[in-house]
Image (tube, rainbow, N blue to C red):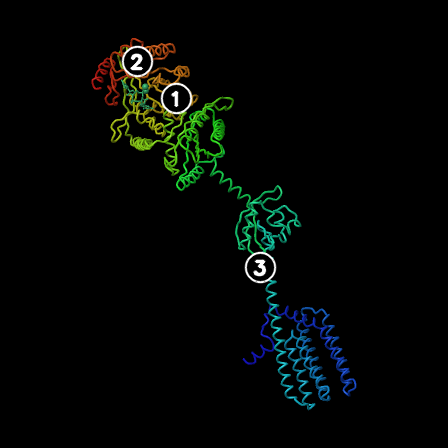
Amino acid sequence: MLLGSLRAIFLGEVDVPAAHREAISVARRHAFHALAPMAAIHSLLNAVVLTAAFWQEPTMPLVFVWTYTSAVLVFIRMREAKRHVPLADCAAEERRIVRYTLFSGALWGAIIIALMMSSGPQHMLLLGVLTAAILCVGALLHSSFPAASLGYSVLVGGGACIGMVLGGHAWSASAMLLLAGCVMALQRFAANSDTNFVRRHISAAALTEAKETMSLLLNDFEAHSADWLWRIDAHGRLGQASQRFIDATGLPADILEGGSILALFAPESAQQLDTVLKQKKSFRDEVLRVQIGGHEAWWSISGQPTADGGWRGVCSDVTRSRDTEARIAYVTEYDSLTDLANRAMLVRQLEIAQEAAETRGEGFALFVIDLDNFKALNDTQGHPAGDAFLKMVAQRLRDCVGPAAFLARLGGDEFAVMQRDMLTEEAAELADLIVDALLAPVTINGKDILAGGSVGVAMAPDNGTDPAILMKNAELALYRAKAQGRGCARFFEAGMDEVARIRADLETDLRSALAEEAMDVYFQPLVNTRTRKVSGYETLLRWNRPGHGLISPALFISCAEETGIIVPLGDWVIRKAIEEAAQWREDVTVAINLSPAQMKNPSLVATVVGALAASQLDPSRLEIEIVESVLMDETEHNIRTLHALRELGVKIALDDFGTGYSSLSYLRAFPFDKIKIDQRFVRDIDTSTENQAIVRAIISLARDLKMRVTAEGVENEQQAAILAGLGCTEVQGFLYSRPVPASELEKKDPAARQSASVLHMRRRA
Ligand code: C2E
Ligand code: MG
Ligand code: MG
C-alpha cells in the first residue's frame, strides 16, 4: 500500500493502457531525444565551468577524463536522437535510454564524489550549485522516463552526499537533508510531468480516434445519403464544401467556399435563415428557397452552433416533395379546370370573414351561382365542350366580380362569390351584374350557347355568420331564384328556412315510401267523344303520405325529380301500370307520364321493354306522355329516346300542350301521336271565346300534322259538347271519372258494357 503510494508519487500515477503502450513509448523517446541538444549544451557548459575551476588543481586529470567521457555520452545521445528506431525495437531502445541515463547519473555522481572529497571550501559553493543544477536539469531532461530519472537523481544526489561525508565538510548533514528534499521534489515533478504527458497523449489519441470515426461516418454519409453537410464560420462564411454540396449548388468550390451562406437563398428565405442563425440555437428542417442564378430549388436545412461561434449541419433537397406538396395543396384548394378556389378554400375564407364579422362587426356577402343550361350542353355537346364552357364562364365571372371578391367553383356548374365589407344595396347591384354577365351567349365550337345563371345571396351577419349556415341560406335563395324562373337573383329571406325544412321532410318521407312501396297507381279514363266509350286510361301516381292523406304528384313530383327519386319511382310506375293494363280489354290503352328526369335515364327504354315483355302487353297499347320541357333540355338525347320508344310501337303524346314556350316548334321537333290540350284552355271554354279559338287552332294544327287531340280537365257536359263540336276526338276529366285505383276499374269489360261502366264511374266520382 505504502509502496504503491510511493510508487505513484515518484514514478507516476498512470497505468498506460495496453493499446497506447507502444505509441506512448515512441512519444516518450521522442520527447527524450528532443532534449538531446539541451543535454549537450548542459554538458558543455559544465565541462567549461569545471575545467576553468579546476585547471590548476590536482584533480584536473579527473575532470579531463570526466569531460571526455561526458562528451562521448553526449555524442551517443545525439546520435541516438537522430536514429530511426523500428517499432519492434522499442523495449530495447527504452532499456538503452535507461542505461544511458543511469550511466550518466553514475558519471556525475562519481565526479562529484571525487571533487567534493578533494576540494577545499573555496570550491564547495560551485560544487553545491553544480549538484543542484545537474539535479534540476537532469529531472527535466529525463522526465519522460521517471524511473530512469529517479535513478539518475539518486546517483547524483548520493554522489554529493558521499563526497560531502568523505570530504568532512561542515553542514554536510544539513546539506544532505536539503539534497534529499530536492531529489524528492524534482522526482515528484518528473513523475507528475510524465503523468500529464501520458494523459495528454491518451486523450489526444482518443480525440484523433473520435475524429477519424467521425470523418469515416461523415464520408459514409456523404457517399450514401442524398443529403450533404455544410459548415459556416461565425461570420456566416461557408467552409470546405463537399462534392454533393457543390453539385447541389451548381457553383464551383472556390466560389462557394468562403462565400456567405445567405447568398444562396432567395431574399425571404435568406431573411428566415438569418433570423434562425441569430438565435444561436439548434434548428431543424427549415425549408428555404434556393436561388442561384436561374436555378431554383427548395432545401430543408438543419444545424447546430459550434464552439467557435460558427454552425454546422445537414441539408437536403426537398424540391420534389415540396412540388408534390404544392400540387396536393393546389388540388385540395383549387379547382384544376377553372383555376378558381374550390369549396374547401371558400369555406376557409368564409371562416376568416366570420371572425372579422364577429370581432369587428364587418359584414360580408355570399353569392351562390348556378348555371341554367350547363347540363344540357354537357350531355349534348360532350364533356370537352362542357369544360370549355365552364372555363369561359369562370373568366366572365372573374371579370365581373373584380379582384376584391373571392371567387370559387363549388363543383359542377355551381360557383360562389364572397365579398367582404358589402352593404345589401351593393350586393344587389353585384348580383344583377353577375346575372347580366351570364346572359350574353358563350361561343363554343363556333356555336353560341346561352349560359344564363341564377344567383342566391346571403348577407352576413344578418343571415348568419357561420359558413355552413350562410352557405345553406344562399343555396335556399338560389333555389328560390331557380323556382321563380331562373336567370335572376334572390336574397335569402327568413321564411325560406321553413320551406326548406318542409321539403327536407318530404324528401325523407318520399324515400321511405319508395322503399316500402307505399305508393299506388290510379287510373283516369280517356273517353272517345263520338262513341263515349273508354279508349284508354291515364296512369296517375298517388301517395298515401302518413299524416297528409292521399296526395297528388303535383305536390311531390318536383321533389322526386330534383332528388333523383323519380327514376326508381318512375320505373315502378311503368311496371305497375303495364302489369295492370295487360288485364284490360285489348282495345284499351294505358298512358304513363314520364318526367324529363326519367328521359335522361339511359335504362328507360330497357325498363319499358322489360315491363312490356313481362306482361305480354302489345306496345301499341302503351302511350307515353311527355311535357314540352323534355324537348327543351338535352334535345338530341331525348329525341333519340323517343324514337327508340316509337320504334317499339309505343305511342308518344305531348302533354299539357299550350303551357310551354314555343309549342309549335316542338310539334315539328318530333312526330307525336297525340297532343293533350292543357286544362287551362278547357276550363273556361264554355265562357271564353278566346280559349275556344285557341283550342280550335290547336285541333286544326294537329289535324294537319296527323296527330290526335285529347282535351284534359273536362268537368261538365257543356265543355264536352263544345270540344266535340270543335272536332276534339278524345276527352278526359272529372265529368267521366276522377282517377281511381285499379281495383275499381271494370277489368276485361266487354265492349257492350263500356258506356255503363263509364256511367258507373261517374256516380262514384
Ligand atoms: P297530367 O299528366 O296533366 O295529369 C292530369 C292531371 O289533371 C291529374 O292530376 C288529374 O288528376 C287532373 N285532372 C284530371 N281531370 C281533371 C278535371 O276534370 N279537373 C281538374 N281540376 N283536374 C283534373 P294529378 O293526378 O294531380 O297529376 C298531376 C300531374 O302529375 C300530372 O299532370 C302529371 O304531369 C304528373 N304525374 C302524375 N302521375 C305521374 C307519374 O306517374 N309520373 C310522372 N312523371 N308524372 C306524373
Ligand atoms: Mg298526363
Ligand atoms: Mg296534362
**Drawn side of residue 466 relative to residue 262, left or right:** left
Closer to the camera in the image, 758 or 144: 144
Q: Which mark is residue 730?
A: 2
Q: Secondary structure at mark 2?
A: strand
Q: Neighbour class for label 3 at 10 Å: few (<14), some, many (≥20)?
A: few
The three-letter code of the residue at mark 1 reads Val
The three-letter code of the residue at mark 3 reads Ala
Single out the mark in the foreground, 3 or 2. 3
Residue 743 image position (x, y, % from top left):
24, 23
Closer to the camera in the image, 427 or 16: 427
Kindly identify which residue carries mark 3.
307
**Label 2 beta carbon within 8 A of ligand 2:** no
Residue 580 image position (x, y, % from top left):
28, 22
Looking at marks 3 and 1 on the same chain, the residue that comes earlier in the sequence is marked by 3
Q: CA distance from mark 3 to mark 2?
A: 105 Å
Q: Which mark is residue 353?
A: none
Q: Secondary structure at mark 1?
A: helix
